[in-house]
């Protein structure tokens, strides 16, 4: 049914926390999970005798099993230098008089969320500020 609806026997998922690999009605559904911990190796094979539906083979591999390409790794490291510098930066003063917590960020208001939205709202001279919980990480006090 999935293959008939999309016309191709492969569905690639994105922005999923958990890996998923299943074949339903001759359609392979693959989600690699988060943080590049898994890599999907996908082989699509068309029959050489003419048009038709290809055969799809997918293997999920732990990214630790693979050896990085040295040139690509060099480029990744160069781009990461920006993030390393940002991690060392102080963007604002953090108040010492009240504890900050991001525990439960996805289901309730937290002191970290309130603090960050307030700083952004005030700095940009806005009436309000909303931030999706997914961009605030940590889940800690």
Image: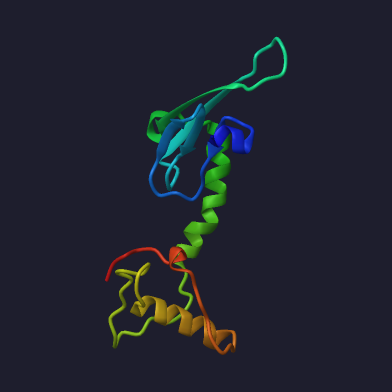
- In the rendered view, tell whether residue 131 sits above or below residue 30: below
For the C terminus, which image quadrant? bottom left
- In the rendered view, tell whether residue 85 sits above or below residue 124: above
Q: Colour mode?
A: rainbow
- Asked whether, in this view, residue 124 is left or right of residue 15, the answer is right
Farthest-out residue, right? 50
Give the total number of marks visible in the rendering: 0
Measuring 51% from the left and 43% from the top, which residue is drawn there?
13
- Asked whether, in this view, residue 97 is left or right of residue 60, the answer is left
User: For this rendering, which residue is in front, 70 or 95?
Assistant: 95
- In the rendered view, tell whether residue 48 sits above or below residue 135: above
Q: Residue 75: image x %, image y %? A: 58, 42
Q: Residue 52: image x %, image y %? A: 67, 20
Q: Residue 89: image x %, image y %? A: 47, 69
Measuring 40% from the left and 49% from the top, which residue is drawn there?
17
Q: Residue 10: image x %, image y %? A: 56, 32
Q: Residue 138 appears in which quarter of the rendering?
A: bottom left
Measuring 53% from the left and 88% from the top, which residue is drawn there?
122
- In the rendered view, tell whether residue 119 sits above or below residue 68: below
Farthest-out residue, top? 49
For the N terminus, which image quadrant? top right
Measuring 42% from the left and 34% from the top, which residue is drawn there?
21
């Amino acid at each position: 049914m999935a293959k008939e609806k999309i016309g191709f026997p492969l569905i690639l998922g994105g922005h999923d926390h958990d890996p998923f690999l299943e074949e339903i009605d001759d359609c392979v559904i693959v989600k690699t999970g988060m943080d590049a911990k898994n890599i999907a190796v996908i082989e699509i094979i068309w029959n050489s005798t003419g048009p038709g539906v290809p055969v799809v083979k997918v293997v999920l591999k732990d990214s630790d099993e693979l050896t990085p390409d040295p040139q690509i790794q060099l480029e990744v490291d160069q781009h990461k230098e920006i993030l390393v510098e940002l991690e060392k930066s102080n963007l604002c003063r953090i108040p010492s008089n009240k504890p900050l917590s991001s525990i439960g960020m996805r289901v309730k208001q937290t002191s970290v969320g309130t603090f960050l939205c307030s700083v952004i709202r005030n700095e940009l001279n806005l009436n309000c500020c909303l931030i999706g919980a997914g961009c605030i990480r940590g889940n800690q006090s």
